[in-house]
Structure formats: structure tokens, C-alpha cells
Amino acid sequence: MREVLQVRFGEIFLKGLNRPVFLRKLVARVRSAVQNVGGHVWLSDSRVYVSDVTDMDEAIRRVTKVFGVHSVCRAIEMEKNDFEAICKQAVELMKDCEGTFKVNARRSDKRYFMDSPMINMELGGYVLEHLPQLQVDIHHPDTVLSVEIRDMAYLYTHPIMAVGGMPVGSNGKATLLLSGGIDSPVAGWMIAKRGVTVDAVHFNSPPYTSERAKQKVLDLAGILSESLCGIRVHVVPFTDIQMQIHEKCHEDYTTIIMRRYMMRIANAIAKKEHSQALITGESIGQVASQTMHALSCTDEVADMPVFRPLIGFDKSEIIAIAQKIGTYETSNLPYEDCCTVFTPRHPATKPKMDIILDGESKLDTEALIAAALENTEVIEL
């Protein structure tokens, strides 16, 4: 008998003949998550298990952040043929519980000498006899005592919900335009949840943005990395481009032109990193550069899909997700962002392409982008 961490998955069940591919990814992600706190990780009979755990609370915290994991629990693993021992262990597991309970048995081993209703009845009766403070309520119990009969017997209570989704690396790769704000970390998290490997591009404008602002973004990337299974951040020097846009382009159009240069650079990095799409945290109408007209103008310079998972979200909905995933507090730190540098008083909300192109014609686009790419710093988290 021993305590193990039992890991359950959800949507992977729907993958049919491709399921083994997704399961191998999931096992690898769980194994990576429990480095230094867990020993053996293996897949058996539609469950992933972690044994020899040195810090169960930390292992649970990490594994619940792994995309593809539906829920986890601390489970007692024991021989399944000694039903009396199972009953005694159930009493030990339930001895501190009060109120009502029920037994929920699952018998994947159909050769077992008792079926699920019989296990429920016999085990529930034994617990009730030895723990008189408990009462049975099969509809709304305070505690559910679960027992699974597989290769071994597993007993547990109180499973902990995880993030769900699909294992990272099972659905391609995309590049996130990551700022220090609330929205873009949420957007990256949402796309990664669907199994997409995510890299990030951050635009840095010293001396108008400080080292603290850069570190804030790296801290956000570090928070995301637990679920993203690591992340590579490309820090792009953007000061020269912003200065030239500010000096040579129509003032009301500086924001939209700046966004187009960001998209060009992110597109180039994404190609180099073999990404298939870009990700932004834009939501329609949230700011001037996120109107329908403006988004169409920025998309025009990208030659790959641009994913905007927050496009129809209210700000309050985005904040709720940021709080859930742990990025909100860091995003709220009051350090400057390059997007706020040289912000025009009256940014164009319905930009005209001829004015945009006229402004860009005054810039040496190819040289500016080449210099930014050449001096980009790559940080692995």
C-alpha cells in the first residue's frame, strides 16, 4: 500500500486512434512538471500516476496547471483482492469526515468478484458501521468516497480540478505578442490550453521603458511557463522604429503604424521559429488600435493567421481569467509599456490605407526591421 498522485484527463478520450499520441505528450508534460518532487510517472488503464512523491502539495499545484489534465487526487494504491483491507483503509481515509457521504465505485476490471453496486453497498455499510458520526446521502453528500478497481485498487476523496485542455505540443506552434498588460498573457494562455506550443515576442523601448518594465514581462512569461511547459521570449529593441515613426509619420497614425511594424517583426520571428500563427490580446473596440478598421490594417502585413482569443471579451471577463491564472497582480504593476510611448492625443480609429502607406514610405522599413531582428535578445524560461 502506498500514496500516489492520480491524474485524470478529459478531452483526450475523444481522440480515437490518435489518442496514444496525445497521451504520450501528456505523460511527458506531467513528468516535466513533477521534476524534483516526484519519482516514477506512468500511464495505466486511462489514468496517469505519479509515485515516490516527496512534496505532494507542490506536485498537485504543478500538475493542476498542466494543460490536458482534468483533475488530480491523492490516492491510496493497494492490492484489490483483499476487500477487507480495502474496507479498513476506507475507514482510515474517512475517519476525520463529518456529515454525509456516499461511495462511488468504478470497476474497470470486469473480472473482479464484486460489481460496482455491490462494492458501493458493502464498503458503504462497513464505513457506516465503524464511523457512526457519518450518515449516507447518495444525492448530495458532503464527502464522496471513490474506489476504483483497476490493476490495483485506488481509494480517494476530494479530487482537485485542473486546467483541462490539450497537452502542449499536440496542436502546432504559435507566437504571442506579449506586452506587460492584462490581455496578452491571457490570450497566450488560452491558445496554449488547446495544445499549442507558444513562443513570445516583446517589444522594448529603452530609455522610454525601464529594466523593471522588461522584468515585469519576463515575470509574466515565467508565470505562464508553468502551464506552457517553458517559453522562449524574444525581446525586440523597438526604440529606433518608434522614434522614426513619431518624427516622420502623421501624428494620428503613429499607433497604427507602430502596430504594423510589430506585426511585421513578430511575423518574421514566427517564421524563423516555425510557428504557424500569431497571437494577440486584442478585443474589438477596447482601444483605438483595436477597432475593426485598425485590426484589418495590422493584419494586412502578416502572412499567417492571427489568433485573437479575446476578440469578443469584455475587460471584466479578461480580468477574471487573469486572476484565475495568476497573471493579474503582475500585469497591474505600474511600469511603462512601449505601447504607451508617444501615444497620440487623437489616434485614428478608422485609418485610411493611403495615409498609412504614405507614412511608411518615409521609413526605411527593411533596414529598421533587419536591425531590430539582429539585436533581438532571446530568453528561455
Image (spheres, rainbow, N blue to C red):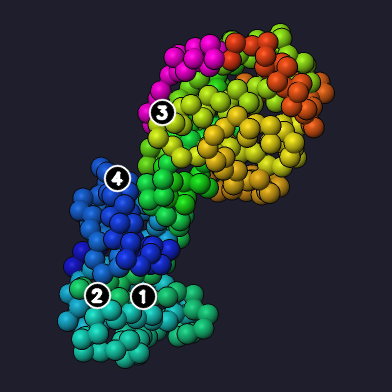
Q: Amino acid at mark 4?
A: Ser
Mark 4, mark 3: which one is toward the viewer? Answer: 3
Q: Amino acid at mark 2?
A: Arg
Please say if 218 is above or below 18: above
Mark 3, mark 2: which one is toward the viewer? Answer: 3
Chain-order first, disc 4 or disc 3: 4
Chain-order first, disc 4 or disc 1: 4
| Residue occupied by mark 2 | 150
How far separated are the C-alphas under marks 1 and 3?
49 Å
Q: Amino acid at mark 3?
A: Lys
Q: Is residue 148 left or right of residue 332?
A: left
Query: CB under 8 Å between callouts 2 and 4?
Result: no
Residue 68 seen anywhere in this rendered image of the structure: yes
How far separated are the C-alphas under marks 2 and 1?
13 Å
Query: CB under 8 Å between callouts 4 and 1?
Result: no
Circle 2 residues within 10 Å: few <14, some 14–19, many ≥20: some
Circle 4 residues within 10 Å: few <14, some 14–19, many ≥20: some
* Residue 333 horizontal/vertical position (percent): 60, 29
